[in-house]
Amino acid sequence: MPAILTVDSGDSKPESDSNEFRVAMLFALHLQENSNISIWIAPDDQRLIPRVRIVADKSTVIELTASVYWQAVKDVGWHTTGQCGFDIGAVAVPGYSADSDIDIRDYETNFLLYRRSKSLNNIAARLVYLDYKITQNDPLKETLISQFQISHTNLRNIDNNALRCMFGNTDIKSSFAYGELEYEKFIDVLDGDRFIRAVLICDPFIELATRILWLRSRAELALNPAQAWRIEHIAAPCAFATDLDFGNPVLLKRAFSGIDEESADFLSNPITRCLGYNPKHGKLGPTHWHAAVQNISRFEVVGHAEYYDSFAATLFDRLGIERPLPERRAEPKRVLELADLLRRMKEVDPLIEMDLELNERVLSVIRKHWSPGA
């Protein structure tokens, strides 16, 4: 299925800077019976002839220019000439066989199109692990990448149509998708038994404190004229967070009472937004909260940060992974201190009231079955 793609240009780029290194393109991939791989890519500039970078058996590196014509792609107006396809096999890659390790990426964006490696576990499952947190530094992510054939960990940087392409590709049997997306938009694709869905809930005050401190750190980029463009898309939230006076409760309460709409949208109810938001239902509100509750009730693995080890163990058991659990990263002291400060201010509650209720619902269920640290 073709899709419009907006991606981070490489796995090594910081996931948090979500407006950087973005590019649009269309693509589709198909695995043929003889182990050849057919791909077409339509760049954002329809006049360009796309290229891919292929690494075979970790030693042979080949850059291919599209040489296959796709008349259908041209006919629908996605490419000027239709010269946008690749047939990747022994002819294109010397020594290539069905047993070869292979890594194929779009040359311009470094987006991973296909990977096959004997060093990966290649679990026969498709895991979608939603992480709505701004930092997305769960150590489980690092462990899980080595367990699957293909991993994409920058979901917030991928256009919705491209996500549909990824999720809808039935040729890929082992995949791991991690990060933030508006799940409500993908129910028709992700509901059912084709995917294992997981989410880890954390204290909404801790996430709010983390987001505020993250915004303050991003705002420092504006001091450098060469870097200021990196935060243009979050200029108002950065300014709001920077102006907060944590040492003056009166001013702090006044700031949250008069928060601007753009900053409120960035900070408010990220759990509900991730699990239940759909713009077709209007501005984020109770309708989306109810959708979030219904959606999360159908997830295969749901956990809470207070019971992190139990969540990790359950997920590993569901996937058949037999290895030590990764150690949970402790929250920074300054995050915990700010969270405690915010917890004592009723002016903050409207920002996260839906997440607070969802958080309590999850905790009430988990407490009946799991023990902290178990």
Image: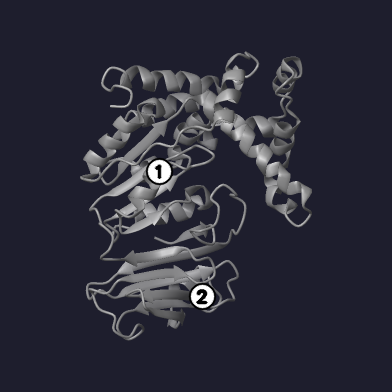
Percent across and percent down for residue 82 are 49, 77
Q: Can residue 346 be seen in this view?
A: yes
Of callouts 2 and 1, which one flags the residue occurring earlier in the amino acid sequence? Answer: 2
Give the numbered dot on residue 50. Answer: 2
Which residue is at a point 57% across and 19% down the rendered structure image?
340
Percent across and percent down for residue 246 are 70, 23
Which residue is at a point 23% across and 53% down the rendered structure image?
124
| Residue highlighted by disc 1 | 139
Q: Which colour scheme is used?
A: one colour
Query: Are there few (<14), some (14-19), or many (20+) residues within 10 Å of tag 1?
Result: few
Say whether residue 28 is left or right of residue 346: left
Q: Is mark 1 on a helix, strand or loop?
A: helix
Say whether residue 174 is left or right of residue 290: left
Query: Farthest residue toward the front?
Result: 333
Which residue is at a point 26% across and 35% down the rendered structure image?
314
Q: Is 44 above or below relative to 351?
A: below
Q: Which amino acid does label 1 sit on?
A: Pro
Residue 216 sits in which quadrant? top right
Q: Nearer the viewer, mark 2 or mark 1?
A: 1
Spatial CA span between label 2 and label 1: 35 Å
Q: Marks 2 and 1: CB-CB under 8 Å?
A: no
Say whether residue 19 is left or right of residue 83: right
Question: Where, quadrant-wise, is the N terminus in this rendering?
Answer: bottom left
Percent across and percent down for residue 101 are 30, 71
Residue 91 sits in which quadrant? bottom left
